[in-house]
Image (cartoon, rainbow, N blue to C red):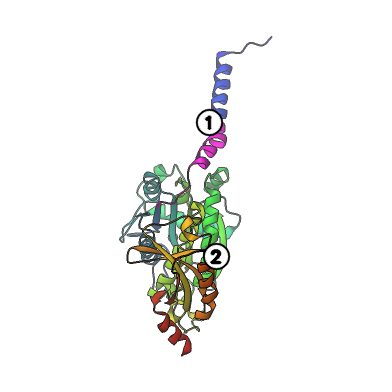
Amino acid sequence: MRLITGTTRRSILTLLRLAGIILLVLGIIQPIRSQEKVTVQKVVIDAGHGGKDPGAIGKHAREKDIALDVALKLGDYIKQQFPDVQVIFTRKTDVFIELHRRAQIANEHKADLFISIHCNATKSATPRGSETYVMGLHRSQTNLEVAKKENASILYELDYATVYEGFNPNSDESYITFSLFQNAYLEQSLVFATVLQQEFRDYTGMIDRGVRQAGFLVLYRTTMPGVLVELGFLSHPEEEKYLASAEGQHKIARGLFRAFNQFKTGLEGSIAVVVEPDSSATDKPPDQAAQTTPQVVFKVQIGTAGKQLPKDAPAFNGLKNVGFYRHDGLIKYTIGNEKTFDDALPLLELAKQKGVKGPFIIAFINGERVTVEEAKAVLNR
Ligand SMILES: [Zn+2]
């Protein structure tokens, strides 16, 4: 016969409690969360570095300045297209913000998405392109090096040893902690990271260096889907020029916005905002600046509403792939994305057949609404 001593009983109780906590974390929190309606109403945009911490330094440009410019532009685009979305910046000026404070800002606001914006640099001038990180354990030394470089920001903080519980950004051992990291938001973070890289590749024309994982303190401490994006390399002379230029930053911020748009509308099951092609020759990276012709697009307008409608709204009469643009405070719904006026005619017919009242063809040049005659004139040139 065995006696259970007081000490053993206590350790069993402790074990049971621990098991309970683990079950709670794994089994219960997840289902509750998944029953909630998923929306993206609050986004935190985090411009990396700032103040005494310049981040990576190129020949002419500094990471902290580019990150801030792109962050502010992205925030503007989101506010313009989604006036209901709350945009929170961790910084709007050139100030130093501690890494833990950035995460805290996002957590306090109960944000739905966290986007940390950075630029890369290496000793070699050859690497170029964009990469997006989600929290996790690095699978390659390259990824670890990027995390080390970004986490080294805490060395500018006065009390980093206490705040980060002895974490040493430069020691490989410190990163083993991240192998235990369980991320409830990994799936959504990966979705956002993936569409972001797609936009970098297809829209901005940057080289796609892929979605990666590494242990970033700023992501480690945030409790929502989040990514850290390395826009490009300041150590690559041409890419530095592009990243520092107004056109480059505009294009990159548009790419980030397009990814946000896809992520939000995808999660919410609402229709995607029409992001008009707005590229001109200078918008392209230097080696792809060959295209100079204005982009003309014809669509069929099927209706106007004061608010955003779900994609299966009765007002759309069963028409698929409905897009919209905002004009004069109203949302105008469209179908099609055609190169010529004649290509839009069958869609006009289709809308009429489906019972849409008074559909008509509209035109855009480089994303600007113009008259159909103006668009035709540009095509005839
Ligand atoms: Zn950085």
Discs 2, 1 touching: Cβ within 8 Å: no
Helix, strand or loop under label 2: helix
Residue extending farthest right: 1
- The earlier-in-sequence mark between 2 and 1 is 1
| x 45%, y 76%: residue | 279
Bounds of the magenta span?
22-42
Figure check: 122 above or below 28: below
Quarter of the picture for ligand 1?
bottom left
Figure check: 249 above or below 154: below
Which disc number belongs to residue 21?
1
Amino acid type, mark 2: Gln
Q: Nearer the viewer, residue 247 or 2?
A: 247
| x 40%, y 45%: residue | 110
How many residues crowd around disc 2 within 10 Å: few (fewer than 14), some, or many (20 or more)? many
Viewer-nearest of labels 2 and 1? 2
Counting from the top left corner in percent of width and height, residue 10 is at: 54, 19
Q: Nearer the viewer, residue 254 or 215?
A: 254
